[in-house]
Amino acid sequence: MHIWPVQDAKARFSEFLDACLAQGPQTVTRRGIEAAVLVPVQEWQRLQAAARPSLKQLLLAEHTGTELTLPPRGQAQRRPIVPQA
């Protein structure tokens, strides 16, 4: 992976993009500190798909992170019935 200072990436963006497509991810630094990575779109899509859990994983998960909260029995409020005109 090639490292590009931000000013070089800006000044030579076409070359920067071509390097990404030909060689893979390219790192951009700002003041010597890694700031971003340019990756080909196919790699990005692969990473996004790998990051999402499958439906099977969601259904088999012990804790889904969401709880269904119901009011105590007999405490639910009902909408009033509005007569039809």
Image (tube, rainbow, N blue to C red):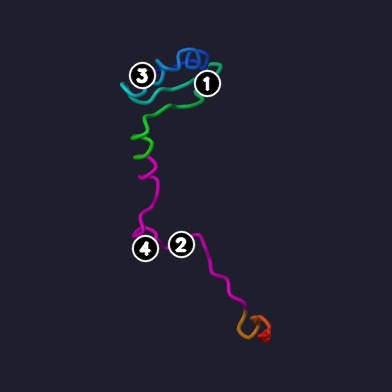
SS category of the residue bearing label 4 = helix
Residue that label 3 marks: 19
Q: Could you tell me how far apart the alpha carbons at marks 4 and 2 are, in whole angstroms?
A: 9 Å
Mark 2 Cα-neighbour bin, 10 Å: few <14, some 14–19, many ≥20: few
Q: Earlier in the sequence, mark 2 or mark 1?
A: 1
Residue that label 1 marks: 33
Q: Could you tell me how far apart the alpha carbons at marks 4 and 1 are, in whole angstroms?
A: 41 Å
Residue that label 2 marks: 63
Residue that label 4 marks: 60
SS category of the residue bearing label 3 = helix
Q: What is the quadrant of residue 84 in the picture?
A: bottom right
For residue 27, above or below residue 53: above
Mark 1 Cα-neighbour bin, 10 Å: few <14, some 14–19, many ≥20: few
Q: How far across and down, in percent of the image, does residue 83 sit?
A: 68, 87
Q: How far across and down, in percent of the image, does residue 47 sit?
A: 37, 39
Residue at the (40%, 22%) spot, across then down: 26
Q: Could you tell me how far apart the alpha carbons at marks 3 and 4 are, in whole angstroms?
A: 42 Å
